[in-house]
């Protein structure tokens, strides 16, 4: 059984925010577009935290510490296209800089199970990132893109991203999410350069 316990000693000035993007509702839970939600949910489980409705943003949040590093988890309940509203509210609440934010999301431009961490950049066609960039008026925040590949020729992107993982993808999904949570941990504790070196190179070289 999971319990929520706010870390009163966690300094808001040092708080890092890990925001997973997705769509609320059971019908979307295991769809490709919800990889960010699935990753943040797994992080909460690993740290024995309970995600619950926030008082300061339109989303589910939980606070904890990872080897002495305070962090807040966020799952916006605004639906993907308006994710930026919840992210901006969370940053404002903590008085945190944009560089204290890591957004975890799916990416059509990467093959399934390929991850790419970057300190900034465009939205890459992801409407959640587009909303965050608009609300923050900045591209200067970390983002962990989790590849879902592209649909077969003739299929619509919307149907693909809102569709459930196929049989092969479901088999590999737990390890994919595990790698993403590990990447989040290195980003939090050792910084983005270390995390990029470790996880971008790992996948680009085809190693596990």
Image: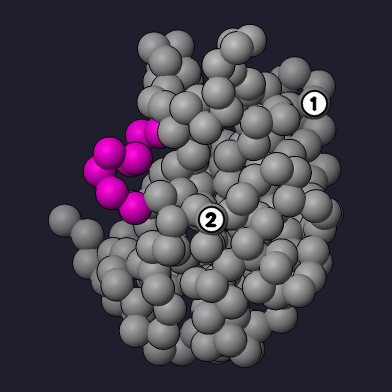
Crowd around label 1: few <14 · some 14–19 · many ≥20 (10 Å): few
Q: Nearer the viewer, residue 165 or 206?
A: 165
Residue at screen point 53% across, 55% down: 81
What residue lies at 41% left-to-right and 84% top-to-bottom? 56
Residue 5, given in percent of the width and then of the height, sits at 30, 76
Q: Compared to 136, does 102 lie above or below? A: above
Which quadrant is home to the C terminus? top right
CA separation in Å, label 1 and label 2: 29 Å
User: Would residue 81 be visible to someone looking at this image?
Assistant: yes
* 194 and 26: which is toward the camera: 26
Q: Which mark is residue 81?
A: 2
**What residue is pinned by disc 1?**
204
Answer with mark 1 or mark 2, whichever residue precedes in sequence: 2
Q: Which mark is residue 104?
A: none
Disc 1 is placed on an element classified as helix
Give SS at disc 2: helix
Q: Which residues are magenta?
A: 24-31
Q: Nearer the viewer, residue 117 or 91?
A: 91
Q: Nearer the viewer, residue 22 or 134?
A: 134
Q: Position of residue 15 (x, y in %)?
A: 59, 79
Q: At x 44% / y 33%, what residue is drawn?
A: 162
The residue lying at 42 percent from left, 27 percent from top is 163
């Amino acid at each position: 059984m999971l319990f929520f316990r706010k870390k009163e000693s966690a300094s808001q000035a040092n708080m890092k925010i890990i925001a997973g993007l997705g769509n609320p509702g059971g019908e979307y839970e295991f769809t490709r577009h919800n990889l960010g939600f699935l990753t943040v949910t797994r992080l909460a489980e690993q740290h024995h935290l309970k995600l619950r409705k926030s008082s300061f943003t339109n989303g589910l949040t939980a606070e904890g510490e990872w080897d002495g590093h305070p962090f807040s988890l966020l799952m916006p309940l605004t639906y993907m296209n308006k994710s930026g509203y919840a992210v901006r509210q969370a940053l404002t609440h903590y008085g945190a800089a944009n560089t204290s934010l890591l957004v975890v999301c799916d990416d059509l431009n990467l093959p399934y199970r390929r991850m790419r961490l970057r300190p900034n950049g465009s939205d890459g066609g992801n409407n959640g990132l587009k909303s965050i960039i608009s609300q923050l008026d900045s591209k200067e925040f970390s983002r962990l893109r989790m590849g879902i590949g592209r649909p077969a020729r003739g299929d619509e992107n919307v149907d693909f991203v809102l569709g459930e993982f196929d049989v092969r993808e479901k088999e590999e999904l737990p390890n994919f999410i595990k790698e993403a949570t590990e990447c989040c941990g290195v980003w939090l504790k050792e910084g983005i350069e270390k995390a990029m070196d470790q996880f971008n190179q790992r996948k680009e070289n085809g190693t596990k």
